[in-house]
Image (spheres, rainbow, N blue to C red):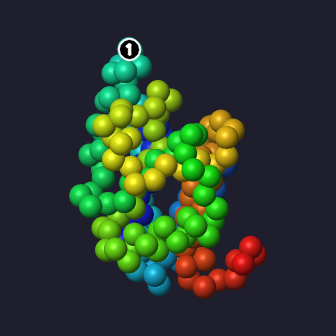
Amino acid sequence: MRIVVAAIGRLKRGPETELAERYRDRAAKAGRSLGLRDVEIVEIRESRAQDAPTRMLEESIALANVIPDGAATVLLDERGENTDSAKFATLISQWRAANKPATVFIIGGADGLAPALADKAALRIAFGTATWPHQLVRVLLLEQIYRAVTILSGHPYHRS
């Protein structure tokens, strides 16, 4: 199974990018023993449309194009479920056991996602009720993916 983080916008060089890459690399290396082929980042350019509904539609179409058939799709949504790390790991394990070709985490743009894409999600998760910049959301997500992989690999988890 592949893990894909599909995000609207690109991270600029800086500490957030370095930290995101560090967690992505750690998760990819640790995940090999679990049969995870890779942890990929797909960055999609922000739409330049003049109005929000058109931007949302264009970005959602671009995101939908990177989701493989049969993949588990997870939206990062401020109104989503607050999921602890152990449950997050369990979900990834279940999708892997169900032979999903990928788990795709979607970080939408500032205008949100078109309902047609949002309705296809298997899960919506949030990192609390605060509003987070997209750069930090990506770092938080990649850290949780890394943590999930280590939990599934049998590394001691301090909350167990």
Count of numbered circles on the image: 1
Which structural element holds mark 1? loop
Q: Is residue 73 left or right of residue 149?
A: left
Can residue 37 be seen at all in this image of the molecule? Answer: no
149 up-or-down from 79: above or below: below
Q: Quadrant of the N terminus?
A: bottom left
Q: Residue at x 60, y 76 (%)?
A: 150
Q: Residue at x 33, y 21 (%)?
A: 54
Q: Quadrant of the C terminus?
A: bottom right
Q: Is residue 15 left or right of residue 48?
A: right
Q: Residue at x 64, y 62 (%)?
A: 84
Residue 132 is drawn in which quadrant?
top right
Counting from the top left corner in percent of width and height, residue 119 is at: 36, 42
Q: Residue at x 47, y 27 (%)?
A: 111
53 up-or-down from 72: above or below: above
Spot the residue most to the left. 69
Counting from the top left corner in percent of width and height, residue 63 is at: 34, 43
Amino acid type at circle 1 is: Gln
Can residue 2 be seen at all in this image of the molecule? Answer: yes
Residue 96 is drawn in which quadrant?
bottom left
Residue 102 is drawn in which quadrant?
bottom left
Q: Which residue position holds label 1?
A: 50
Counting from the top left corner in percent of width and height, residue 87 is at: 58, 67
